[in-house]
Amino acid sequence: MRSLVGEWISNLAMLAILAALVDMILPNGNFRKYTGFIFGLVILVMFINPLLQITNQAEQFNNSVSRNIIAQRTETAVFQSSQTEKGQRERIEQVFRESLEKNLAADLKYKVGLDNAKVKIHFGERNGETDLSVIQRIDISADFKKNRSVNIDPVVIDTSRKLGETIADAEEEEKISEVKEYISGMYDIHVSNIYINRK
């Protein structure tokens, strides 16, 4: 019994000396804090272990520690899995949005004649997550003036036009209305949710 106590005390002393040496060698920082915590935990377990063996509770203690380790690993795995799923979902949303925006920009170029449109699509939300099946808003930035032909129009006096409004402005408004109607029909979105910003 005396030899067991002596061995136990010498093991505790050796571990304490090793912890002190590691603490002196390591630079200040988070890693030093973690090693100090781990050594303190090991010393605590070494100190408690003989007391538990004397009271015949060492096996219960080991089982409890094992159960806690398994529970912690399970929680870690579930958390990592959820973070991976969230990252994948965000990446899928990003790829889908970019694809739709490129397709709409290409459609506007080839079917409507806007070859310089920048498109931004905003989706709706359901239960706190992005709902890719509902387009909430579409923003388009385009320079309609670049698409004008340089023809000299004959002078026509039109009394129905507003003061200061030119034929080019009226054509631009007509083109914007045409673009909105086209997008509205294609994506089943109300015209009021399509915003066109002129460059």
Image: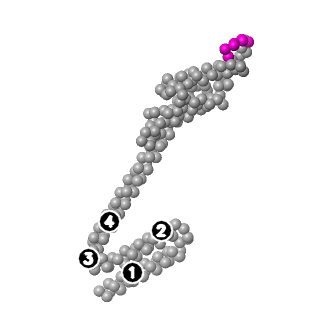
Task: Give the amino acid at mark 1.
Answer: Asn
Residue 102 locus on image (x, y percent): 54, 32
The residue wearing badge 4 is: 66
Question: Viewed as shown, does residue 44 lie left or right of 30?
Answer: left
> Over which residues does the magenta segment extend?
155-161
Residue 128 locus on image (x, y percent): 44, 43
The residue wearing badge 3 is: 56
Q: Earlier in the sequence, mark 1 or mark 3?
A: 1
Is 156 part of what is drawn in magenta?
yes
Residue at 31%, 67% in the rendered image: 64
Label 4 to label 1: alpha-carbon separation: 23 Å
Label 2 to label 1: alpha-carbon separation: 21 Å
Task: Give the amino acid at mark 2.
Answer: Tyr
Mark 1 lies on a secondary structure that is: helix
Residue at 55%, 70% in the rendered image: 28
**The C terminus: image quadrant:** top right
The residue wearing badge 2 is: 34
Q: Work out whether residue 130 can be spotted.
A: yes
Q: Comparing marks 2 and 1, which lies closer to the viewer?
A: 2
**The N terminus: image quadrant:** bottom left
Mark 3 lies on a secondary structure that is: loop
Q: Earlier in the sequence, mark 3 or mark 4?
A: 3
Label 2 to label 4: alpha-carbon separation: 21 Å
The residue wearing badge 1 is: 11
